[in-house]
Image: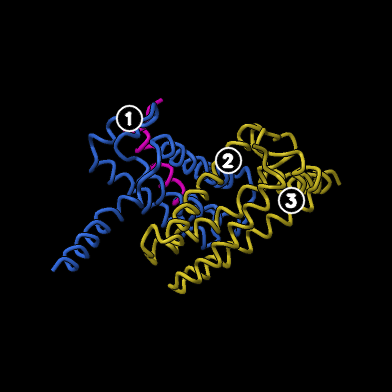
Chain colours: A yellow, B blue
Amino acid sequence: MLRPIVMAAVAAAVLLVSPTSHAQFAKPEDAVKYRQSVFTVMGRSMGGLNAVVRGDRPYNAAEVQRNAEIIAMMAGLPWTAFGPGTESPKALPAIWKEGDKFKKAQDGLQDAAAKLVAASKTGKVEDLRGAFGNVGASCKACHDDFRGK
Amino acid sequence: MLRPIVMAAVAAAVLLVSPTSHAQFAKPEDAVKYRQSVFTVMGRSMGGLNAVVRGDRPYNAAEVQRNAEIIAMMAGLPWTAFGPGTESPKALPAIWKEGDKFKKAQDGLQDAAAKLVAASKTGKVEDLRGAFGNVGASCKACHDDFRGK
């Protein structure tokens, strides 16, 4: 009877550990560095699209689509890096105190970013402008509530 | 005659400026921060796949594929951030002195990363292992030649 019990215990341990180990970082600083890096990569592509939307850079379909795809991919990444014990000056306590609201903000960004990718494929700068504006509004709303100075 | 000349001059200016403005960063520090952020994001996904390949994390097809796609996307991004005047302690002078070799290293990574994405879709850990090893070898070769301590 021992062996099945041990195996069951191992299986249970794996089940318990797996989702956490996916999210876990070796040190809190690693989590902070990771999420900040994600936002840096996203910010560069936002800047690129902003220049197109403002007319400061010519509309290049491939570049526009690539930037939209980078933004959409980045929009899914930073959230697991806001684990307990990863407070930083730019991450306000509201992130941990108002988890539901923070989650809603994440979902809002991911939704807006998915629509940005769709808009980037029409080849029309007007479509890009609207979708880009919504992503920007999503960024700003979350920054207002959850980002320190 | 003036108008066509002016228009031609504008067109020439746009042609001259566009590719550069795509690559340009406002400050050299911005370029350094951007490329380091890209490598941080890539490194996290490499770590995730490494754990799977070593058997330290269960094979989760969706997670494996997502990490491969993150790596492939990141593999295309940092290179324009190695412009003139963006030297940093971790970026060896060879980057600027041996441009062709550096370009070949970039292409090697991008090729290996594309194959990693393909391998991530077969659902077989052996396929992942081989393709992941090639990406890792690509990273290492480039670090050996171009990355400072």
* Residue wearing tag 3: A102
* Residue wearing tag 1: B92
The image quarter containing residue A123 is: bottom left
Count residues near mark 3 (Cα–Cα under 10 Å), then give few for <14, some for 14-19, many for 20+: some
The answer to whether tags 2 and 1 share a subunit is no
Counting every numbered tag in the picture gives 3
Q: Is residue B107 left or right of residue A118?
A: left
Q: Chain of mark 1?
A: B
Q: Residue, x 64% and y 57% (percent of image)?
A: A138
Residue B75 percent across, percent down from the top left:
42, 49
Q: Amino acid at mark 3?
A: Phe
Count residues near mark 2 (Cα–Cα under 10 Å), then give few for <14, some for 14-19, many for 20+: some
| B125 w.r.t. A33: above or below | below
Residue B60 percent across, percent down from the top left:
63, 55
* Residue wearing tag 2: A36
- Quadrant housing the C terminus of chain B: top left
Magenta segment range? B131-149
Tell which of A122 and A76 is nearer to you.
A122
Q: Residue, x 54% and y 52% (percent of image)?
A: B67
Q: Residue, x 46% and y 58% (percent of image)?
A: A49
